[in-house]
Image: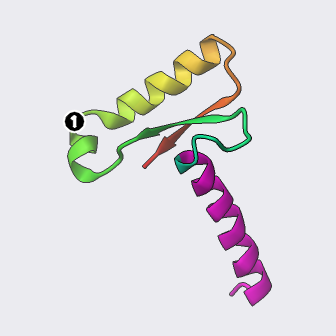
Amino acid sequence: MKTIEEIHEIAKSKREELDLRVNTSADTREKHILVCHGTGCTSSKSPKILENFKRILKEKNIENVRVIPK
């Protein structure tokens, strides 16, 4: 079990990550590509799309973009 302080730190870091996704004026150079990872999307090949995004970013040496299954 985590301490309450650890839980608050985790919540804070996740809140900051979420703010970067929804706040287009956030002061960050990292961008996120959100790929659906629900049941319907998974059956429609979203894991392949996720891997293709990651592969292309690596091939092009793009480091300021993160692909996130959502």
Q: Point out residue 43 in the picture as x, y percentages from the top left corner.
A: 21, 41
Residue at the (51%, 42%) spot, across then down = 68
User: Which quadrant is home to the N terminus?
Assistant: bottom right
User: Could you say which quadrant of the image residue 7 lies in?
Assistant: bottom right
Horizontal and vertical percent position of residue 67: 53, 36
Q: In this view, does 52 lie above or below 26?
A: above
Q: Is mark 1 on a helix, strand or loop?
A: loop
Three-letter amino acid code at disc 1? Ser
Task: Report if residue 3 is visible in the image.
Answer: no
| Residue at the image position 62 percent from the left and 48 percent from the top | 20
**Image height check: is 13 above or below 37?**
below
Q: Quick one: label 1, few (<14), some, or many (20+) residues within 10 Å?
A: few
Q: Is 21 displayed left or right of 51 in the figure?
A: right
Q: Taken as a whole, is the magenta stretch helix, strand or loop? A: helix
Specify the segment rendered in magenta. Answer: 1-21
Among the 4 quarters of the image, the one containing residue 18: bottom right
Asked if residue 70 is positioned above or below residue 54 in the image, the reply reads below
Give the total of numbered labels: 1
Q: Is residue 69 visible?
A: yes
- Between 70 and 42, which is closer to the camera in this rendering? 70
**With 17 as the anchor, is 34 left or right in this view?**
left
Camera-nearest residue between 24 and 7:
24
Q: Provide residue 14's location: percent of width, then percent of height.
A: 63, 62
The residue labelled by disc 1 is 44
- Outermost residue on the right side: it is 5
**Residue at 45% from the left image edge and 40% from the top image edge:** 34
Please say whether residue 5 is one of the residues in the magenta stretch. yes
Task: Please state the horizontal and vertical placement of residue 50, each as a whole percent of the image.
Answer: 43, 32
Magenta residue check for 6: yes
